[in-house]
Each structure stands twice: as C-alpha cells, then as structure tokens.
Image (cartoon, grey):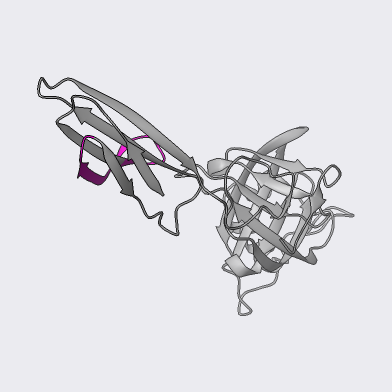
Amino acid sequence: MTFTWSSEGATRAIITKLLPTGQLSSSSWDVAPSGSMTYTIPTEERNWVSLMLYVENAARQNAMATATVRLYCPSPWFFTPPPEEICPTEPLISAAAEQRFESGSMIWVEAEDAIYVVHKIGDIAGHWQRFQDEWDESQPTLDPALVPPAGLQQPIRGFGLVWRERPGVREGLGWAIEGEQAFTTIVQRTTRFKYNAWYLLALDGGVWHLGPEGSYWTKLNPEGFVITPDG
C-alpha cells in the first residue's frame, strides 16, 4: 500500500499506524512534510488498515489526517449473505454432535475439543457458554443416580460431564429431549480486535450465531440464505 501526502508550511511530519480501537500504535515513522511511503500490510491483518499523518510547523501549529483502507478477506463466510461487514477466520470443518434439551442445546466440536451450551430464557434467546471437553473413556458415561422423567434423557459422555458438573448448566438446560446426533459442522468467528462473535453450522442446516463474551445467541434460519460448506 502506497500512502501519498502533501502539506504547506510544515516542518515536521509523522505517520502512525492506528490500532483497530482507533488508538495510536507503537508503529510510527518520521517522514518529509510532503512525500510518499510504502506500507507492507502484514498477512495477519484483517478488515481495515488505518494510518494517521501528523504535521507541524515552526510555530507548533499542527494538523492531522487519517487514511483507511478496506482489506480483502482471504476467507469468505461459509454461508451467504455474510452476516457482518467484517472478515471471518478461516472456516474450521469438524466432526460434531448436537443434542436438544428442554431449554436449549449442546454442540460438541471435535476439532476444538469444545462443547458449546446455549440456554433459552422463556421464548427468547439467552446466553451461551463454551467449555473444554474433559471427558475420556476412563470416566463414567453417565450418573446412574440421576433418573430422568419419562420421555426425557440424561446426556452422556462429554455432554453429560458438562451438564452434571458445570454450575448452572443442568438448571439452565433441563433434561435432554433426544439423544445426541453426529454431523459435520463449520465454525467461524469475526476478526475484531476484541468482542468477537462465533458462527457454527447447526445440525438442521441453520447457523448458531453466538454473540461476544457469551452475551446472547440467536439461531439463523436455514431458509433465506445458502449454506456453502465448501467455501
């Protein structure tokens, strides 16, 4: 990227790269009051690059200008239309399992060794949590002391361990209404500086939209957009 500028009466000029938050970074360059500079965009950069020009004259009067360049996203979202005007991470395709409960769902993603829990609050979406899957073959599959009501089930293996031992999960989900079902999921998240959202392909072909920091979740309907697992 070539950055070109000009000024009148300036005796000093500095170019500084801005952080995604808009704050000044530690990367700055003393430059001529008028000229050009080539900035090599790091391969890990996403979304935007912003450079700020600061100029000053002998009387210490100053002025500033900012140039922002929108970057090409190296990976597309795995479904269309894209949910946000922001680049996603590379799609992670993984073996998975999903299980529905009285008041929510659990999703296991093998490639992350993680279990996602989404809780319902009444008839609206509530909060979600993400746990490491700590279950292994040496542990009990379930707790025989917990007997579900007729027509309901106790989750087993990794789902069961999280359901039994993580505070609030069992109370938030209730009993399972069906067994866990295996499928292949795709996981992507936004690439903001912080407060990123997660998107997971669901068992039914919809997409779980998990808001930043477990704040909220929604289920995007599979009707109305096209799922494109192959990118």
Instruction: Tell me if I can see residue 155 in this picture.
Output: no
**Left/right of residue 56 with respect to residue 72 in the rendered view:** left
First to last magenta residue range: 17-33
Percent x, y for residue 169?
64, 49
**Is 94 situated above or below 5?**
below
Residue appearing at x 38%, y 47% in the figure: 2
- Specify whether residue 157 is painted magenta: no
Outermost residue on the right side: it is 151
On the rendered image, what quadrant is the C terminus found in? bottom right
Residue appearing at x 29%, y 27% in the figure: 64
Residue sitting nearer the eye, 126 or 89: 89
Percent x, y for residue 157?
68, 69
Instruction: Tell me if I can see residue 223 in this picture.
Output: yes
**Left/right of residue 80 with respect to residue 54 in the rendered view:** right
Residue sitting nearer the eye, 104 or 163: 104
**Is 92 situated above or below 25?**
below
